Amino acid sequence: MISQRTTAGIPPWSLAIAAMLLIQLSNALSVTVIAEVGPAGTAWLRMCFGTVFLWLISRPQLRSIRRKDIPTLLILGLVTGFMTTFFLAAIERIPLGTAVAIEFLGPLAVAAITSKKRGSLIWPLLALAGVVLLTEPWHGEIDLIGVGFALAAGACWGLYNVFTQLVGDRFSGISGLSLTIPIAAVFTTIVGLPQVATGNVNWQVLLLAAGIALITPVISFGLEMLALRRMAHAAFGTLLAVEPAFGVIIGLLVLSQSPSILQIAGIALVILAGAAAQRSGSRTPKLDLVDGGHPAKETI
């Protein structure tokens, strides 16, 4: 358990970096599970095991939920579940680093749209040029379905960042996750359960899925929520610029996926676009008022 007291002196960007590395590691490890139960089945197992772990750590504070909180919680649960589902479907077809770069267009667009600087919308276009270099469509081998899944995951990712900050402002620590991850599990049941039911499920697959769930969503999403409570949307979106590079590194180390020179240049363009989209900023977290009007303690 990490409390706000123990993380108060830790820069929020370092929490976000740790979260990004853990997310990409969990995605790479998920490839083995995907081969047995499919991408939707893997995502659903991760959400289900994540719910179990979160409820063991922090049971949801149902009495603290206000009527106006419900739409936000439902939307965050929905986009969390399908962000994972679409992304795992993407890495089943295209390299991890390429999928992350394409998915990054979502939060980058959010950072550009929310920026007050004129001309900021040029950066998603620069990132798009990088994605073209990554996918190398002139070779005629581009997997359009894989790219489509990555784009869908990116749209969910952009919404995820926005609604994670809203939920993080309302619910302390991982109490928000203990509410939204079960919702994600429910929403993804319709696509995940059939794949699990027809897949090759054994105790090794379940054990690996449980371990991955402990990494993501439990630890990594918790770290993200702590970071987002102390960072602006644009600042967090800018910091995410390094995530495609993390995807390439993890893909190389764990999955032996080696990018070409042009693909490395594409990654560099995506990172440059993300870094230029908005300069870093800070954000003072709002106080949660979930227990009798007193600020709630923040733990993870």
Image: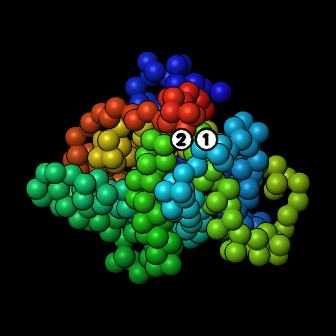
Contact? badges 1 and 2 (CB < 8 Å): yes
- For mark 1, give the secondary structure: helix
Q: In the shown orientation, is residue 124 left or right of residue 2?
A: left
Q: Where does the N terminus fall, quadrant-wise?
A: top right
Q: Say which amino acid is labelled 2.
A: Phe
Please provide percent x and percent y for residue 239.
Answer: 35, 42
Which residue is situated farthest in the right direction here?
Answer: 203
Distance CA(mark 1)–CA(mark 2): 6 Å
Q: Which residue shows up at 52% across the image and 19% down it?
A: 5
Q: Please identify the quarter of the rendering in which residue 104 is found.
A: bottom left
Residue located farthest toward the left when viewing the structure as drawn: 118
- 17 or 185: which is nearer to us? 185
Relative horizontal placement of residue 69, taking residue 138 as reference (left or right): right
Query: Which residue corresponds to mark 1?
Result: 175
Q: Which mark, residue 171? A: 2
Q: Is residue 248 visible?
A: no
Can you give x and y, in whole percent of width and height, for residue 7 in the image?
Answer: 50, 23
User: What residue is drawn where x is 34% and y is 32%?
Assistant: 284
Where residue 144 sits: x, y (%)? 46, 79
Q: Residue at x 69, y 65 (%)?
A: 186
Q: Position of residue 181 (x, y in %)?
A: 64, 53
Residue 242, disc:
none
The answer to whether 70 appears left or right of 214 in the picture is: left
Q: Specify the quadrant of the image occupied by residue 89.
A: bottom right
Residue at 82% over, 49% down? 207
Q: Is residue 14 above or below residue 158?
A: above
